[in-house]
Amino acid sequence: MDTLNPLDQLPAVDRAVATGSRDGQETKSVVLTQTYPVPLADLWAACTEAERISRWLMPVTGDLREGGQYQLQGNAGGTIEECVPQDRIRLTWEFGGMGVSWVVATFSTAGEGSQLRVEHIAHVDERWPDFGPGAVGIGWDMMLLGLSMHLTTGEHLDDAQALEWQMSAEGLEFMKRSVAAWTEAQVASGEDRAAAEAAAQRCLAAYTGS
């Protein structure tokens, strides 16, 4: 199969930043949308079947149905609050004692392919002005890269390969371009450019250890 240039993946994603509220508190959301050249049933299976998820993301355990608990190995876990086949998934996202946030994944047919829309919603705290949407946006860009590789080329990186790639020149450039794209999405949402760019630099430094 053909290979996928990771840097070509970034323009394939539409990004937005949204403001809302939940439980009486202000929220910020990062929203990613991408269309894939595969049937809706295949996209759904890749995102909901444990064996498929492990091929492009990481191993997952738990009861992967509505009301069940899930745990991504070494990453987030939570509760699957809603699961409507080939339509949408709503779940809590709990990671590293950093509080609860929420993810809504929506699936739809798009022309001859299918589309995934992911919205990650979190209450606003001190981390938002410090790091902006890139704090979770870079991670989601990497996850969608893995999904694209899986769906379009069959490629897969194991944990060691993925970490090595992240620290490579190409991986660092991917993160740099990702945070730049999230900065533009943040500015488009109405936030101050200077503040958004400063937060992006802090975010990138945190990801790269620089």
Image: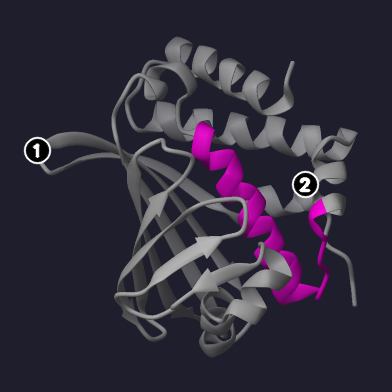
Magenta region: which residues?
135-159
Pick whichever, 85 or 116, lies toward us: 85
Amino acid type, callout 2: Leu
Q: Residue at x 67, y 48 (%)?
A: 10
- Counting from the top left corner in percent of width and height, residue 48 is at 51, 78
Picture layout, residue 91 above or below residue 37? above
In contact (CB < 8 Å): disc 1 and disc 2: no
Amino acid type, callout 1: Gly
Question: What residue did someone put label 1 on?
Answer: 24
- Mark whose residue sits in front, 1 or 2: 1
- Counting from the top left corner in percent of width and height, residue 64 is at 45, 78
Instruction: State the colouring used for the structure image.
Output: one colour
Q: Residue at x 32, y 40 (%)?
A: 122
**Does residue 77 appear to the left or right of 19 in the view shown?**
right
Residue 132: quadrant of the picture? top left
**Does residue 139 appear to the left or right of 163 in the view shown?**
left
Residue 34: quadrant of the picture? bottom right
Which SS type dominates the magenta stretch? Answer: helix
**Residue 129 located within the stretch drawn in magenta:** no
Residue 124's tag is none
Question: What residue did someone put label 2 on?
Answer: 7
Quarter occupied by the N terminus: bottom right
**Does residue 39 appear to the left or right of 33 in the view shown?**
right
